[in-house]
Image (cartoon, helix red, strand yellow):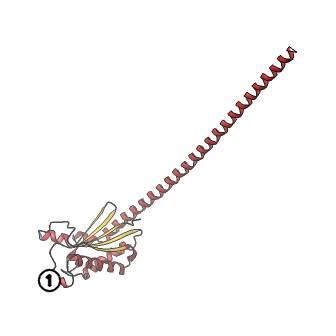
Amino acid sequence: MKGISIGILVMLVLSLTGCAELKELRVETSEQKELIDQLQKENQACKDSLEATQEQLRQAGLELQAKEEKVREQSEAFTRMQQAMKAELESKQVALKELEGKLTLTMVEAILFDSGKAEVKQEGREALQKVAGVLKTVEDQEIVVAGYTDNVQIGERLAKIYPSNWELSAARAISVVKILVADGVNPENISAAGYGEYRPVADNDTPEGRAQNRRMEIILMPVRK
């Protein structure tokens, strides 16, 4: 009887031990599953992040390529403008510069307008035709025609037409825009601005300085997006 009791006790101990091992195995299996799920999620997150980074790099490459193309196009426009305006550049009637992504053609008043007038002279029309020949071939570029004056106030008689230098500079810019558009420049890419006497490039106290300030600028720059 005592032997039977011992046997039953041994079987009970073995049974309990087996149950404990099974329970522990189930716990380990559950923890491993959770770990596997977590690793799979992290792996997917890494893949998504990698794909996003690759797409960003692709977009950055496209943007860089577009910028390089615009720079190349503007440089070509600069060269063509130099060739087209060779005579005017040599006579100092116009100046051409390329700076900070902008191409600026500056034309003195004398080549375009008579004093106090906003109608472009024949000499100016011929010069603007050369300018238009270059500008009409340029794409994805914004063209701004800006008029400037010296600080001499408008006379009483002329003030009936142009009350201030603002109106005169704006009227001159519009006249230039109309000629450029008539010669083939896309009207969707061009605008006019008048700054009057408020953006001088020289001292208005001397005749030479005032002459420099009476100018027209044709500015070519990448389209803003």
At a point 19% along the width and 85% down the height, the residue shown is 160
The location of residue 157, given as percent across then percent down, is 15, 85
The location of residue 111, given as percent across then percent down, is 22, 76
Please state, as top left, top right, bottom left or bottom right, where the C terminus lies in the image. bottom left
Amino acid on which the number 1 mark rests in the picture: Glu
The location of residue 161, given as percent across then percent down, is 21, 84
The location of residue 184, given as percent across then percent down, is 38, 78
At a point 15% along the width and 76% down the height, the residue shown is 153
Query: Residue pushed farthest top?
Result: 2
- The quarter of the picture where residue 217 lies is bottom left
Q: Is residue 223 left or right of residue 210?
A: right
At a point 75% along the width and 29% down the height, the residue shown is 19
Q: Is residue 34 left or right of residue 59?
A: right
Circle 1 packing at 10 Å, graded few (<14), some (14-19), many (20+), is: few
Relative height, residue 84 to residue 68 (above, below): below
Residue matched to label 1? 156
Whether residue 186 is visible:
no
Whether residue 22 is visible:
yes
- The quarter of the picture where residue 188 lies is bottom left
Relative height, residue 88 to residue 157 (above, below): above
Please state, as top left, top right, bottom left or bottom right, where the N terminus lies in the image. top right
Nearer the observer, 30 or 192: 30
Nearer the observer, 203 or 130: 203
Q: Mark 1 falls on what kind of element?
A: loop
At a point 83% along the width and 20% down the height, the residue shown is 8
